[in-house]
Image: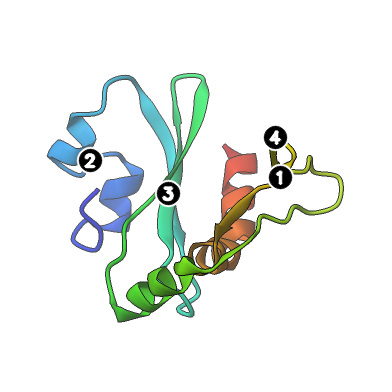
Amino acid sequence: CGYPHTSRTSLELWDCGPACSNVTGDVTDVRQIINDGKTDAYGYVARRGDRCVLAFRGTSNNLGWFADAASWRLVALDTRPGQPRCFAGDKKCRVGAGFYESYKSIVHYIEGNLSEI
């Protein structure tokens, strides 16, 4: 949605120009997910009609490129206790290490914001 050029207020009001106006349906309860500075991870959660949406921005700096490069190595997609395990057939799901580390750096923000909307 134009980050970093779109202000937090504009994004949360879903008033970010063509990127927002081209989305069909009602978009409400938009919340930015901003990283802690240790990764390049950034995204937002929102409601679109009766569904929740989680979207991530692409890489925007060298820190992010380093994390992307680390994703050549696949690691097991671990879940926390009480969550269903991820399998593809009889093989455990795997994800790029760099992408997974970026995701883990903001997962608590994602979960908190999703539970609020």
The mark closer to the camera, 1 or 3, is 1
- Where is mark 3, residue-wise? 44
Q: Are marks 4 and 2 in contact (CB under 8 Å)?
A: no
The three-letter code of the residue at mark 2 reads Asp
The three-letter code of the residue at mark 3 reads Tyr
Q: Are marks 3 and 4 in contact (CB under 8 Å)?
A: no
| Badge 3 or badge 4: first in the primary sequence | 3
| Badge 2 or badge 3: first in the primary sequence | 2
Q: Are marks 4 and 1 in contact (CB under 8 Å)?
A: yes
- Tag of residue 15: 2
Q: Secondary structure at mark 3?
A: strand
Vertical order, 48 against 78 (above or below) = above
Q: Kindly indicate the quadrant of the structure image that contains residue 15.
A: top left
Q: Residues within 10 Å of mark 1 (few under 14, many from 20)?
A: few
Q: Are marks 2 and 3 in contact (CB under 8 Å)?
A: no
Spot occupied by residue 108 in the image (x, y as percentages of width and height): 64, 59
The mark closer to the camera, 2 or 1, is 1
- Where is mark 1, residue-wise? 91
Q: Secondary structure at mark 1?
A: strand
Vertical order, 51 against 37 (above or below) = above
Spot occupied by residue 13 in the image (x, y as percentages of width and height): 31, 41
The three-letter code of the residue at mark 4 reads Gly
- Tag of residue 89: 4
| Label 4, label 2: how far apart the Cα atoms are | 43 Å
Q: Kindly indicate the quadrant of the structure image that contains residue 104.
A: bottom right
